[in-house]
Amino acid sequence: MQASCHRRLGDFSRALGIYQRVHASHPEDTDCLNALVVLCQDLGRPWEGYQQRLMRLQERGRGTGRGSAEGAAGVGSEGRGVEVGGRPRKKKGVGVEDVDVGSLLI
């Protein structure tokens, strides 16, 4: 959640650092890997390694996805999935509207 908030606020370097720490602690979290792929692509950083790991996890069916790192570390994608190489997409059935957190900061 923290990383996605920083990403939405445009603080990409902080978001990247948080996602990298989550990935180090939870290497099979597919949501984190998805976010790393997209963020690294947007920043022009190497992303192929993250995508290869994500594809291997998906092929094995071992990706933990939502719930592992977020529950333990309080970070994640706020009920959103991220398509590989794409943009965040909302999960169906989630009745929560996006809030501009920048307007809530003092």
Image: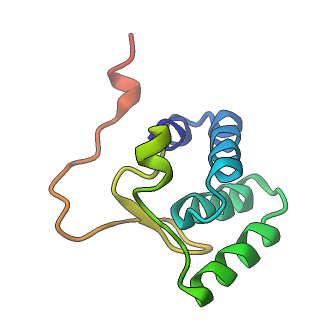
Query: Which image quarter holds the C terminus?
Result: top left
- Could you tell whether 41 is left or right of 46 in the image? left
- The image position of residue 39, as x and y in percent, is 66, 55
- Could you tell whether 9 is left or right of 102 in the image? right
Q: Nearer the viewer, residue 39 or 57?
A: 57
Extreme residue in the right direction: 46
Asked if 21 appears above or below 86 in the picture, the reply is: above
- The image position of residue 38, as x and y in percent, is 63, 62
Extreme residue in the bottom direction: 59
- The image position of residue 11, as x and y in percent, is 62, 33
Q: Nearer the viewer, residue 102 or 49?
A: 49
- Could you tell whether 28 is left or right of 65 in the image? right
Q: How many marks?
A: 0
Which residue sits at x=46%, y=55%?
Answer: 68
Which residue sits at x=44%, y=52%?
Answer: 77
- The image position of residue 28, as x and y in percent, is 61, 65
